[in-house]
Image (cartoon, rainbow, N blue to C red):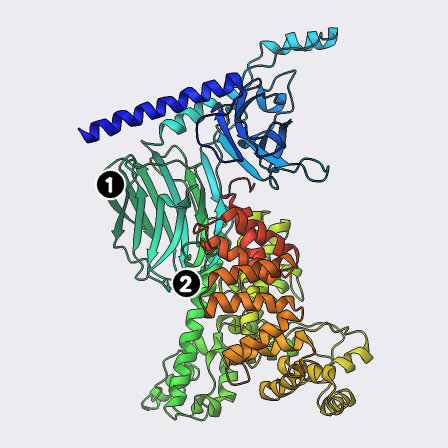
Amino acid sequence: MNALHSIIFGCVFTASVLMSHCKSQATSTQSTEALPDNFIGFDSVPDKVVDGSVVRVRYQCSRPCRLGVEVVVSALRKTDLVVFRRKWISSVPQVNRIHQVPLRLPPSISYQPDFFNRNILDMQSMTVRAFLDYFKNGTELSTYRRSVLRVYKVLQIMPLSERPSKPPTECLSWWAQLMWQLTDDRIHQCPHESDIIDLLKFPLASTGEHFGVVRRLQPFIDGALERARLHAVTQPSVALSVWVYLLKRCHRKLCGIVHRIDRKKSYDSILLQLTDTGNIVVQARMTTGKDGAFLINVALPLWKWIRLDCFIQHSKVLLDTTWDDETRRHECHFQDSIHYDDTDGYFVIGGGKYIPGIHGYFGPIKYYRFGTAQTDNPLHPKSTLQELEKTHQECQEIKAFTKAFCKEVAENRSLSPNNKGVCTSDFYPLWGQLKDRKKTCSQTWTWKLQQQFSTLYHLLQTKEEIIQTGSLGVKQLGRLLFELAVAELFSVERTQMSITSQSMASLQVSSCFGNHRASLLLASIHLAGLGRPANQQQAHVYSLIGAAHDDRFALMHVGYKHSQGIDGFPEDLDMAYSYYSNVGSQSGVDASRIHESKQYLPEHIYLENKEDLERMTQDEASDVFQYLKYEAERGNMEAQKRIGTMLQWGQNGIPKDLERAMKWLERSAMQMRDPTAMYDYSVLMIQGKGVKRNRTRGFRLLEKAAKMGSINALNGLGWYHGTILNDHKNATKYFEKAASSGNVDAMFNLGLYHLTGKIPGKPWANESAAFRLFLNASRFGHVAASVEAAWYLSTGSLEGVSR
């Protein structure tokens, strides 16, 4: 009885509220509904806006106020484009009112394209929003972003085919009427659209990290094709063919081959992942909203080109794996039909924001939007990819040869030609057999390999004593071979560069041993045709090898080629971004490695100016250093800070010495006159870099530096409160103060707080606020912020931000 009574009472109460809405509209008197002193909201907004639609805004002001309604759209190249705005003033306070605003939209977003309406805006989103603000010293009405109260609603976009035709508003000239009549009955043919898409045409080097290629598909322009695609969302029939070449197993349990992220930033159909044992995980989302996954035990091999053909048919997934001309079929049956909408979100080839990629290469990738019985995706460019495979196979032979040589040396066997245990030419064992001598050769390589790798073999022979001590590894050999080759290439005794076959062999072995400066140099030699005919195929091979092994110069090289579309690399900004984002990420973490023994800050040195070069590359015996030391010992604060900085970073040719640097920085900071010196020393004290860690003393010094005007210290206080004290309220306060003063690190840190939901009172991720902060920091050169902002721009996954 009580439950029934409460339900009835609730219905009556709701009805009275609805009635008060109607009454307040007619009489403009104060509503009986309890409203705040200031309020704005939509009383009614149509889901699809057409020209002439009416928006009803309900509002109440505590004092005379200004209000506005506007419609904004976002297109591929523009965001927040205002296409309609209406403003008005309310001078009667404390009254609940409803204001009707008829929308007058431009023809470019209201009507179909035709003879009269040719400039059509391809909208991605449309939003109607209202705002309320007060008079401010006679200034203009504030914008939507700066208003006191605001409200918005995202509207449905009307497809071009459903828009009405624009009625003519004026008489046409005779010529225009003639052209209209001639074209009126013409059947307009859509441009040819194929349901077969090449997601990747050129090889992609994948480092096993989070830097894959993003591809976003658009709906079909042809209405019949688009209707067929939409019909197949719940009954899909699609196919995907992917070529991969694996250099290493996944360094984590799972790594990405191809996956899709939907607009809600969740995995969507289809997801192909590789396990750390070489097996494949197939994951899909079903029409019920649940996810399903299968583990396919296939054990993909290393150092072979493998083709994966995935066929999605309603609730069934077929996966064909092919290598060495042998195909194996695997069949997976999901409980329900698979949900598949390829325009919702984006594809990622390799690693993405949420999963690392494979370590190796991707060959051509072909996608069939309406499926196919059999894929047609040959290895292309075949000669380049086969040469890439051949180069890696030779590298395995080189490593095996080197390992065998080092093993023999480690067992205290001299491998000089005088040792009978060394295999020489095949003629000598034959000669020994003719004389009834027993062959004593015990090495594990053949005379043919010894000849093939003669440059490496001769170098190893000269380093036998060092190899026996175990202090010469593969990386050291690679660096040594590279230095020998470069010394020969750029010898000062030669008037022009000379590239011998021995130098090329040294660079090839150096590349194999992991020195990918050699890979980049080989690519440059083959591209430019230095000392030999140009060979784009070999250039592409060594460019990809250097990029796949995470060398940032090689990554920059390949990224630039793709951004410009030169030297046989197709113009592809998505591929260029995948390489550039890797370089940006590496540069972003350099600051955390800055205190390592061999790391130093780069200095600008003008090499053509001999005096400047000598001044910038001096040692402690130089007059400059001795003068600074003299002034520092006399108590000169600037000299103390300068000499401490030189020793801290290893500048001007001075070797790094953190302990001595900290002594001078401490003397400079403890004078309590320079907030910059105080900040620098406090951070090192908190982190324990070159000095005994003392967080309490460092924190107090940081506070004093902030009070003396150090913006960096404000950011440091935010970091200390957030990281050490776990006090995100005060951390946010200091980050906001520093960011408003222009500190880019604080902008980045505040962006991370918005992204992770650490803002007090707002425990949710605010990607829009984070993106704006990242974008602002990137404009001032913050590398990590640039990487974060670029990710949103590359995927177009944030509402209002075009790709």
Left or right: residue 451 compared with residue 527: left
Asked if residue 388 shows in the view, the reply is yes
Image: 246 above or below 705: above
| Residue that label 1 marks | 334
Apparent side of residue 427 relative to residue 126 in the rendered image (left or right) = left
Residue occupying the point 55% across, 78% down: 698
Whether residue 544 is visible, yes or no, is: no
| Residue 333 in the figure: left or right of residue 480 | left
Q: Residue at x 38, y 32 (%)?
A: 370
User: In 3D space, how far apart are the residues under numbered discs 1 and 2 (Cα atoms)?
Assistant: 32 Å
Residue drawn at (43%, 84%), measured in percent from left and top? 424
Residue 225 horizontal/vertical position (percent): 44, 26
Question: What amino acid type should be assigned to the residue bearing mark 1?
Answer: Phe
Vertical arrangement, residue 92 with respect to residue 36, above or below: above
In front of the other: 360 or 754? 754
* Left or right: 258, with 4 as reference point: right
Numbered mark located on residue 673 in the image: none
First in sequence, mark 1 or 2: give its number: 2
Which residue corresponds to mark 2?
247
Element carrying mark 2? loop
Q: Nearer the viewer, residue 403 or 711?
A: 711
State the image coordinates of residue 612 (x, y, percent, origin top left): 80, 78
Q: Quadrant of the N terminus?
A: top left
